[in-house]
Image: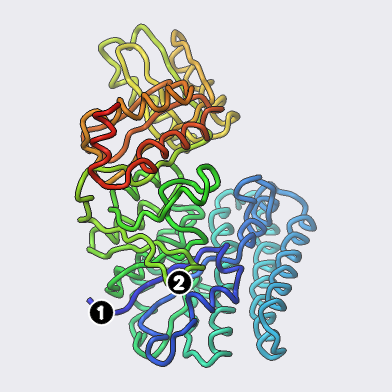
Amino acid sequence: MSGHTVEKIGGTSMSKVDEVLANILIGDREGEDLYQRAIVVSAYGGMTDLLLEHKKSGDAGVFALFSEGESEWLWSDALTRVGERMCEKNAEIFDDEVYRQAADQFIRERIEGARSCLMDLQRLCSYGHFQLEQHLLTVREMLAAIGEAHSAYNTTLVLKQRGVNARFMDLTGWREDTSLPLDDKIRTAFAKVDFSRELPICPGYVKCEEGLVQLYDRGYTEITMARVAVITGAREAIIHKEYHLSSADPKVVGAEKVAPIGRTNYDVADQLSNLGMEAIHPRAAKGLRQNGIPLRVKNAFEPDHEGTLIDSVYRSERPCVEIVAGMRSLIAVEVFDQDMVGVSTGYDAELLSLIDRFKIPVVTKDVNANSITHYVAASIKKVKRLTRFIEERYPSAMITIKKVSMVCAIGSDLDVPGLLAHCAQELARADVNILSIHQNMRAVDIQFVIDEEDYERAIRALHHCVIEQVEEPEDIARLVRVA
């Protein structure tokens, strides 16, 4: 294994260009210390929202306007605004007019190329033999690629301006007429890279046969980082975030009460992914885990802090809770049917098939003799559509839906007799109504389903009893015994 790292910088961090230069890309580095790295960058904050759709609000971006069949001037005007916003970003970054013009020219070519392509596709699909729906995934990939290419190209220019031998790795397939499998595309691109004297800058999106956006939607940047790390034999993968991977959300518990985790394993990372609090995309973690590559999660603005190291072998010396996390908004879908007794397995399989048809993520579930409850992360509108299908399939069933939250105690080793009862008791003392409890034999997490309005109070209560009161690892067993 070589001595280089592969490092991913998120979109929010990328938007703070000067701080990224000072804390990650250059800082105090000189000479050879500038190299032995590959950098994978996300689009600047907000750019992908403008190109596709807003991740949280759902407001239409260029893709949404185009795919909904809106008039040409609507999506075309939106694309123009994206180009203008990107050039404004260029002006913020580059004082030197030569570099700014190069950055503007690069993005104008991409924007106008995409516009011409979409106009031609729209005309083609005005004929009955061609259906727009068949091309929408390709359109989504093309538009998403523009954001990452913009930030990667700019980062390369910024580094060259400062004397660093940076190399723009355009993996987006712009104007390429063939597609390779993802691993082959990366392997070919990096075949002649000399990590000892050049710094590769990669966009988070890679054009490949598999279709990254189709498979991972907007989680593709971490997939790219992981595959680059695996294929080039990196010694470590690093994700730079705008915050530490901490013992709880500082906005809920208070910044003075939380601390970086420091060490954990990929099991814990998987549990966080299941809660939508990704330390890393689970598919990306799989590749790193299988190839023995550790992952470090760092705060982009605290370069001297080691962050949190995640690997496949770590297990805390003594059982302890490492992080308290949760999901504020879940929906419980309970299906009760007397006919389920004795045949619940078949019911469960069919229900999961219906849920999968709507692409609704299941976070956890309860099963007993005559009912199955799936706790899902989806909008109430989508869940109501799902329940209509369930009612058609099982007309004798009674279906109940309820908005809930989930809080979890997570750690690489939670094998402490009485820990679940201790946590439940603390939640009860905090007047938190527990609707359901889940703990499995792997002993990495305990899940409490609660009323939605109790979420923050439950997070604070759990964090206080299993982390703030635990100064030494053996304290967790003592606290459980006392309780």
Q: In this view, does 166 lie above or below 53?
A: below
For this view, does 360 lie left or right of residue 232?
right
| Residue at image point 42% right, 55% down | 245
Q: Which mark is residue 61?
A: none
Which residue has dot 2 on it? 303
When asked about the image quadrant of residue 211, the answer is: bottom left
Q: Is residue 421 above or below residue 474?
A: above
* Camera-side mark, 2 or 1: 2
Residue 276 x %, y %: 46, 44
| Residue at image point 80% right, 58% down | 73
Question: In what element is the residue under mark 1?
Answer: loop
Looking at the image, which is closer to me, 113 or 313? 313
Name the N-terminal-most of marks 2 and 1.
Answer: 1
When asked about the image quadrant of residue 385, the answer is: top right
Give the CA separation, mark 2 to mark 1: 23 Å
Q: Residue 2 carries which label?
A: 1
For this view, does 439 lie left or right of residue 164?
left
- Disc 2 residue type (three-letter): Pro
Q: Is residue 164 above or below residue 130?
A: below
For this view, does 30 lie left or right of residue 127?
left
Looking at the image, which is closer to me, 230 or 350? 230
Residue 182 x %, y %: 38, 66
The C terminus, quarter of image: top left
| Residue at image point 68% right, 64% down | 120
